[in-house]
Amino acid sequence: MFHLTRRIQTVLPLAWIVAGLAESLALLMASSVIVLCWLVLRHLRIVGLVGVAPWASVGFARHVMVDDLLRLAGRVVISPLPYLVGVQMRHFILAAL
């Protein structure tokens, strides 16, 4: 689960460049929303697996969730930059044709 989350978050800048190439703000938001849904589902699964374990395990699950949400928030803050790179690439490609 954790390795998959890192891979998904690593692909986000590429998804934002593709959204810029398509000039679609919906794609820009959709990629971050999909990652957010994945994080919530993963958190619920971790808490479900903890079951009757001590509260410390639930605390660890919350810590992991907060850490991932902060990473996602940081990447969303810089998302306009790759998006604008994609838009500029689209303009250069269309100008060359």
Image: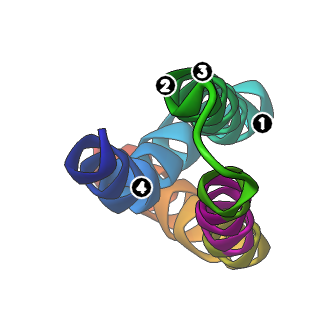
Relative to the observer, which residue lies in front, 17 or 43? 43
What amino acid is at disc 2? Answer: Leu
- In the rendering, which numbered label is found on residue 49? 2
- In the rendering, which numbered label is found on residue 48? 3
- Magenta residue check for 32: no
How many other residues sit within 10 Å of disc 2, few (<14), some (14-19) or many (≥20)? Answer: few
Q: Earlier in the sequence, mark 3 or mark 4?
A: 4
Mark 1 falls on what kind of element?
Answer: helix
> In screen coordinates, is 60 left or right of 77?
left
The magenta-colored residue range is 60-70
State if disc 3 and disc 2 touch (CB < 8 Å): yes
Q: From this view, report whether residue 38 is shown above or below residue 76.
A: above
Q: Which residue is labeled 1 in the image?
A: 25
Q: Position of residue 59 (x, y in %)?
A: 72, 62
Q: Position of residue 46 (x, y in %)?
A: 52, 34
The span from disc 4 to disc 2 (Cα, nearest Å) is 24 Å
Which quarter of the figure has residue 38? top right
The span from disc 1 to disc 3 (Cα, nearest Å) is 35 Å
Q: Which residue is found at the position 48% from the left and 57% from the top?
A: 86
What amino acid is at disc 1? Answer: Leu
- Between label 4 and label 2, give the one nearer the viewer: 2
Q: Earlier in the sequence, mark 4 or mark 2?
A: 4
Relative to the observer, which residue lies in front, 41 or 33? 41
The span from disc 3 to disc 4 (Cα, nearest Å) is 23 Å
- Magenta residue check for 66: yes
Q: Which residue is found at the position 59% from the left and 55% from the top?
A: 57
Q: Which residue is labeled 4 in the image?
A: 9
